[in-house]
């Protein structure tokens, strides 16, 4: 491929390295490929970075570090991407202490900016380390670095799953302070957890009692209240859509939650709403069908539920485990 003048992509390097790491003597196979690349091309950060990245994705952080050290010995100064890839390699493998030690070394060579902070926050969240991730987000804010939207998204999601709702509410307020808008992803996570428990709304009320609430916070709080109470939306689904739209853009996941809200008490309206989602130009997915089928079964509309279930199968979707309990 390379002899014919085609340059392999990073994704291709990842795939090849992943295969090599599944073979016997993976370290030897990996280093042979690296030496072959270095013998055919002028050594550069890009080549070394491809191998650091590939080793990281193959869950071989020790190989990634070996490549990183080889780069320095060859006289090539690691660039920002090298540092980020090395951090990701440790974080993906759950080597948190190694990641923190490496970050300390990076801080001696360059200023820690938003990209490195973002890497730490996102990687720590994926490693299920919310407390350490929060520490770095707060350090970012202290150093007047604005966190990326992804930082807030992964933190809000993880904190919600860990039921740390007071911290979630604080983070939403922090987003507003730095000028970050609530994304569809964050909005959907908040509404999902509001349907699961009233604890998120209770945290919102506690925050409101301690701090002056902004107009946006008031609107979002009202939405969370509506979903936590599973309020009757029979004739007011359009109004609820408009209220959501004032807080964040609706997507198919938002419509699925509205569908679920309807299916709890008004399954006929839920069925009509299913068609309405199509009319709005959205493609209903596995969850859309599952919500409707589950609602029909729960309301003892077994014959109708089975008709929709057949349609679900024709679309290539399987029911969730909770819906399979009715079968």
Image (cartoon, rainbow, N blue to C red):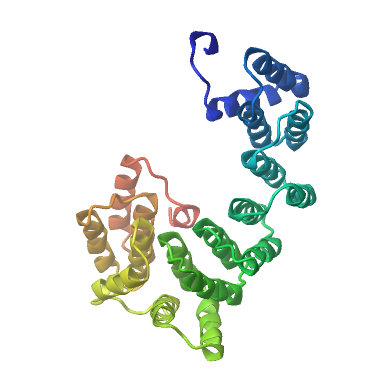
Extreme residue in the bottom direction: 209
- In this view, which residue lies farthest toward the left? 279
- The percent position of residue 109, horizontal first and vertical second, equals 74, 47
Residue 105 position in % (x across, y down): 78, 48
Dividing the picture into quarters, in which one does residue 49 lie? top right
Please tell me which residue is depicted at 67% across the width and 33% down the height of the picture: 52
Judge whether 116 appears above or below 243 on screen. Answer: above
Image coordinates of residue 15 in percent, x first then y, are: 58, 26
Number of marks in picture: 0
Q: Residue at left 67%, top 56%? A: 128
User: 292 or 218, which lies in front?
Assistant: 218
Q: Is residue 126 above or below residue 53?
A: below
Whether residue 194 sits left or right of residue 126 in the image: it is left
| Residue drawn where x is 33% and y is 64% of the image | 259
Above/below status of 214 relative to 282: below
Question: Which residue is located at x 74 percent, y 33 percent?
Answer: 68
Quarter of image, res 225: bottom left
Q: Judge left or right: residue 76 versus residue 15.
A: right
Q: Nearer the viewer, residue 22 or 109?
A: 109
Residue 253: x and y in percent read 38, 58
Residue found farthest to the top: 3
């Amino acid at each position: 491929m390379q002899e014919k003048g085609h340059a392999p992509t990073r994704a291709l390097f990842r795939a090849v390295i992943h295969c090599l790491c599944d073979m016997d003597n993976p370290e030897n196979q990996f280093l042979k490929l690296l030496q072959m690349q270095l013998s055919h091309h002028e050594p550069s950060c890009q080549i070394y970075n491809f191998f650091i990245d590939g080793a990281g994705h193959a869950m071989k952080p020790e190989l990634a570090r070996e490549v990183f050290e080889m780069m320095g010995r060859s006289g090539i100064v690691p660039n920002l991407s090298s540092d980020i890839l090395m951090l990701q390699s440790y974080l993906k493998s759950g080597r948190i202490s190694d990641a923190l030690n490496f970050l300390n070394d990076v801080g001696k060579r360059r200023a820690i900016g938003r990209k490195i902070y973002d890497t730490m926050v996102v990687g720590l969240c994926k490693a299920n380390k919310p407390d350490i991730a929060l520490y770095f987000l707060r350090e970012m804010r202290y150093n007047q670095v604005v966190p990326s939207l992804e930082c807030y998204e992964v933190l809000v999601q993880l904190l919600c799953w860990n039921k740390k709702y007071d911290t979630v509410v604080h983070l939403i307020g922090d987003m507003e302070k730095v000028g970050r808008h609530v994304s569809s992803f964050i909005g959907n996570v908040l509404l999902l957890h509001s349907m699961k428990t009233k604890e998120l709304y209770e945290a919102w009320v506690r925050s409101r009692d301690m701090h002056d609430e902004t107009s946006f916070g008031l609107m979002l709080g009202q939405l969370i209240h509506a979903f936590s109470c599973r309020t009757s939306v029979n004739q007011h689904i359009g109004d609820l859509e408009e209220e959501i739209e004032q807080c964040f853009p609706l997507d198919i996941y938002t419509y699925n939650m509205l569908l679920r809200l309807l299916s709890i008490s008004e399954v006929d309206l839920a069925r009509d709403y299913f068609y309405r989602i199509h009319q709005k130009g959205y493609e209903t997915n596995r969850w859309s069908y599952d919500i409707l089928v589950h609602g029909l079964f729960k309301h003892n509309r077994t014959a109708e539920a089975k008709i929709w279930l057949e349609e679900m199968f024709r679309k290539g979707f399987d029911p969730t485990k909770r819906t399979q309990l009715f079968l």
